[in-house]
Amino acid sequence: MSASAPASPVVERQQMSVDIAGVGFGPAMGGFLNTLARNLLNEDGTPRLVSSVSPGMPLQVICYERADGLGFGVSGAVTRARGIRASFSGVDLAQIPMAVPVATERLVYLLDPVGASRRSLAFRIKDRLLRALGPIVRLRDHAVELPFTPPFLRKHDGMILSLGQFNQWVSEQITSSGVVQIWPGMPVSDPLIEADAVTGIRLSDQGVALDGAPGDGFMPGMDVRAALTVVADGPVGAVGRQIDSHFGLPEGHHQREWALGMKMVVELREDSGLQPGTVLHTIGFPEPEIFGFLYVHPDRLASVGIFIPSWLRSPVRTAYRYLQHFMLHPYIWRYLQGGTLKSWGAKSLQESGRHGEPFLAGNGYARIGEGSGSTNVLTGSGVDEAWTTGTQLAEAVIELLEQKKPFTKENLEQTYVRRRRASWVDKESKIAADSRNGFQHGVVRGLLGTALAGFTRGALSFPAPKSAQTSTSTMEALYGSRIPPAELKQLQQDCAAHGTALHDRIMDRCGWPQIPFDGQLLISHQDALLMGGSVQAPPAYANHVVFTRPQLCQNCEPKLCIEMCSGQAITRGENGVPAFDREKCVYCGACLWNCNAANEKEGNINFRAGAGGLHSALN
Amino acid sequence: MSNAYHIVVCAGVVPDPLQTLEPITPATVPALKNEMMLPAVLDPWAAHALYEAANLAAHAAGSKVWLVSAAPKAKLQQVMMNVAQKASFELVPIDSPASGFADAHAVAALLATVIQSIPALDRSRLLLFGGWESASRGAGVTMQLVAEQLGVVDQFQGVDQLTVQPDGSFEILERIEGGRHLVSTCQGPPALLGWATGNLPEPRNNPQIGMANMRTIMPALQRAKAGPLPQDAIRYLSVTPPKQQRQTRIVKDRSPDEIAAELLEWIVQD
């Protein structure tokens, strides 16, 4: 996949020079700016690190975030918080709204209570065995609590966080220092690349039509020149992907493993029985490939969600309806029944881990956070790792500035990359590197592979898949045993003719029950957009999802970009080309990796930097 | 005669209107549940006043805009990240509760006291701007009370347009019943204008304006003085959120007329 630059007209742009320009505000940028801000001034208020663009002034550091607020991150975050705690030594992190130490942790295997889950023979045998053993294995509510949580998965010494509240709290700590500026609502469209060096960033044009053409009040995006550009715009960020496109990935690296995380924040009923600090990890339902979680915050709030991985090979995979079936599983529903939706959200996760790592540094730039491959796919942890990569870069930047060395690739590798390679982030990343190898051959093998790598601390693992392709199965291969081919074809034709999503029809036909909407927690997908935080699409910005070769879309069936769209922002348009409605886009980026052409050299979706998105700080 | 104006915009901070709000009634004053956790925005009515102020100041050399805002400092800091990119102003922050349940008289007294203490403010050039209404309180009296305490007697509410005449006087359009405007003239400052929506669109985010503003905003926030509001000025007997009803159906191929007719039928049922 690659992201080409928007077709901007040749215009004169405002120019600004700073010392360090940041792209994207999340845990990684939080770690970077928090560490840097504490070191910019001496105790007497004089600059410790002096600006090269504003002589006599402290280092000029500016960060741009595309979302309208700094607390609009989405993550069901349970983290050991080792790096975060190190940054806030002596601070009780429980003071952060919705934060609480982990108290109990359970891994739960969910059986299929409705008989619709697409389970392999091995799973069916296992389920029958568990049901037969019933009381012996403490089967209850179609679920078995595993007697222990594997050590590599444990977060027993960690924290449950709301990423939105955490980001908001961190941004307050940073901006109150007055030495660093963070600007939300300002997407960065492109990196400025000259002679194989990144020399800054270009902000998105404003006052343009949806196709990017200048309109009333056209304001060309400013060029911000910087000696160092810090890229932390996540796995689907436009700047990071353009840098990858320009510089390529290190030999043998790939970014083909993904997942979509979708969650709800629920206010639990008073007698739910769940205590703050409770962590539940689930496997087995609604499909064996789908992992689930439930984290309990203070004040009767809980984050509940699922991950839809790219190895769920269904060409009509979806997240929202599966999330509802997950919530309705008797083991989960006994806690959630009577609850109220407070927030909802979704995000893509780059699950290639170490194998997806881009070049961490180059001339004039450095990569931190999830987009730099920091997420640990074995421990299921990303926030603390991202934070720590940010702190490592800040320490490296301080070292280079104090030694008056430029931000060259070589210098950044000797300082930032060296620190990262020597840290727990990298050591644990190595252990996790091949832990997902089995999933390309089925869930059972995948789980075995994860256990093998986890329990041997990476010494043993399944071999990497030979093929780089991760395309989905055909409809016939996946559903042919349940739905006759002629009926399957008819369903596809009906949905194409009426412009409706195919996954609902397929799931209905496979026996998934209808969702009993209750108006407060079980609600329609569109209501989730309205009640779960609301989506904002500031006017005068261009569409950020563009189908680059419409003729390719015309012949593409089923259209996975539509099925997997978290906000139903992509629908069937004229002539079979998907239509994009930015007022529903939650910026999850699922369309990017669910495009059926995503494995080609040039994918068919250009996912640009966009303003707005989901407005909720509870996620 | 100089056309330079000293424009003071009073603007509160309110929870993002897109969020679901839930009033709670603890022992004393009602509040919004988890208000500090909700994302906040500049009160939308007052935000229009700020855009009008910036536009007016941009066309009158020597003019200056102050933004006086009473809210928890952390929330103000959060809101300024967005607002500061849109218009040039100097922030005068007051670290105080922003709840819409505060007594309007107490809020007005606090604002008036702070405005009187702004150095270099020429009261003869003063234009007091604010929202005609507020997203956090419907009483709509705060600005009027502030102006009275500052001795500003020319007051206009529901303003949609201010036009500076060649002689320096103002022509002001105020909203009245029936979608019409009352046209008034006044000789110029000092005056209070409680803005409705005005005619200006929300300005684009301008990084350079943001950078310039932030040089004064962060120091001002660091110096912000506490402005406590009395807790016992008003006794609330009960608090009820606005009635909300959601009935979702998925219907296709209906004409706009049919949809409108059904909506009308649904509305008049209540």
Image (cartoon, coloured by chain):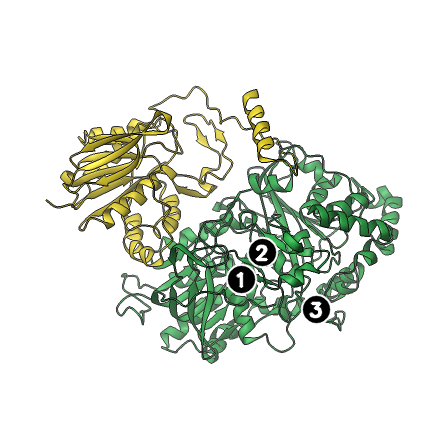
Query: Which amino acid type corresponds to the residue marked 3 in the rendered image?
Result: Asp
In the shown orientation, is residue A115 left or right of residue B190?
A: right
Can you give x and y, in whole percent of width and height, for residue B75 in the image? 39, 44
| Closer to viewer: mark 2 or mark 1 | 1
Look at chain A in the picture and name its colour: green
Q: State the SS at label 1.
A: loop
Compared with residue B6, is residue B142 higher up or lower down, i.e. above or below?
Answer: above
Q: Provide the residue designation for mark 2.
A: A80
Gap in Å between the C-alphas at discs 1 and 3?
25 Å
Q: Provide the residue designation for mark 3.
A: A434
**Circle 2 Cα neighbour tier, 10 Å, few/some/many (<14 / 14–19 / ≥20):** many
Q: Earlier in the sequence, mark 3 or mark 2?
A: 2
In the shown orientation, is residue B263 left or right of residue A294?
A: left
Residue drawn at (52%, 75%) of the image: A418
Q: Is residue B270 visible?
A: no
Q: Earlier in the sequence, mark 1 or mark 3?
A: 1
Q: Mark 1 vs mark 3: tell me if same chain.
A: yes
| Closer to viewer: mark 3 or mark 2 | 3
Q: Which chain is yellow?
A: B
Res A382 → quadrant? bottom right
Can you tell which mark lies on residue A237? 1
